Image (cartoon, rainbow, N blue to C red):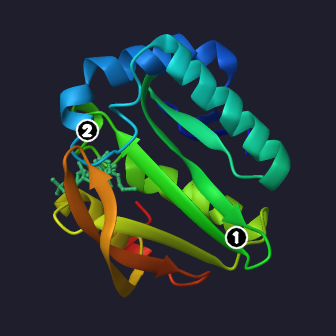
Amino acid sequence: MLRHKINPGLEVRLLQPEHAAELFALVDANRAALREWLPWVDATCKVGDSEKFIAEALRERTATRAYQAGIWSMGALVGGIGHNRIDAAARVAFPGWWLVPAAQGQGLMTPCCQVVFTHAFTQLLVTRIVVGVAMGNARGQAIVKRLGFKQISTLKNAEVLGNRSVDHFIYSLVPGQAQPSARR
Ligand SMILES: CC(C)(COP(=O)(O)OP(=O)(O)OC[C@H]1O[C@@H](n2cnc3c(N)ncnc32)[C@H](O)[C@@H]1OP(=O)(O)O)[C@@H](O)C(=O)NCCC(=O)NCCS
């Protein structure tokens, strides 16, 4: 998926090398909030780190079709969405997504997830999408439930965020499972 216009003001687009400075500036301006649930924020210290992230993501896309996209709202980059990994043999995708605080609470991410997951089921031919969400991450839990994911397990000490280890609820989505109410 190179580019998908969700509505006139909202677009999901593949991250390219020329987006590195804009991506880094966004993370840098919002790092205090983003680091609460995103483990990569503290490792993003300079533009070169965002350049490296995008370059590695493009290589990964060539190798496995897993990709990283930016989310642009009214022309401004406000977050990211993509697949951290695709297990082609098992036909499972492991996505992740985030928005800066100013872009949250507006219903922007739900349609972005729907587009990315529909693409995964129809174009990448995965048969399951799996995501782990930290137990205390209320907005993270709310969106996966809104999208129709079902909790399948829990994973103790799934992730280190700053100096704390957090447990994850593990959620799964299969084609046809999406809630009609999630289609806004
Ligand atoms: C997870 C995350 C993307 C959710 O963002 P979000 O804005 O809550 O998600 P949505 O786009 O689905 O928006 C839903 C919210 O918009 C509100 N909203 C406002 N206008 C709306 C509209 N026109 N349509 C739909 N929802 C609307 C909803 O009421 C809801 O807000 P509420 O939870 O306060 O009731 C965000 O919290 C985030 O980036 N968190 C940090 C990273 C993270 O946890 N990622 C997930 C783990 S991979």
Height in image: 45 above or below 173?
above
Q: Which residue is mark 1?
A: 121
Q: Which residue is mark 2?
A: 35
Task: Tell me the kind of residue under disc 1.
Answer: Phe
Left or right: 164, with 160 as reference point = left
Height in image: 129 above or below 1?
below
> What is the secondary structure assignment of the residue under circle 2?
loop
Q: Position of residue 16 (x, y in %)?
A: 68, 24
Look at 69% across and 59% down and name the residue there: 119
Task: Residue lying at the far right in this picture: please name it.
Answer: 62
Look at 62% across and 81% down and name the residue there: 175
Query: In the image shown, does 72 or 67 lie closer to the viewer?
Result: 67
Task: Tell me the kind of residue under disc 2.
Answer: Arg
Q: Position of residue 114 (x, y in %)?
A: 53, 60
Q: Quadrant of residue 98?
A: top left
> What is the secondary structure assignment of the residue under circle 1?
helix
Look at 19% across and 47% down and name the residue there: 163
Q: Disc 2 vs disc 1: Cβ atoms closer than 8 Å?
A: no
- What whole-number distance in Å separates the C-alpha atoms at marks 2 and 1? 30 Å
Residue 11 visible in the snapshot = no
Left or right: 141, with 127 as reference point = left
Q: Which mark is residue 100?
A: none
Query: In the image shown, does 34 or 77 lie closer to the viewer?
Result: 34
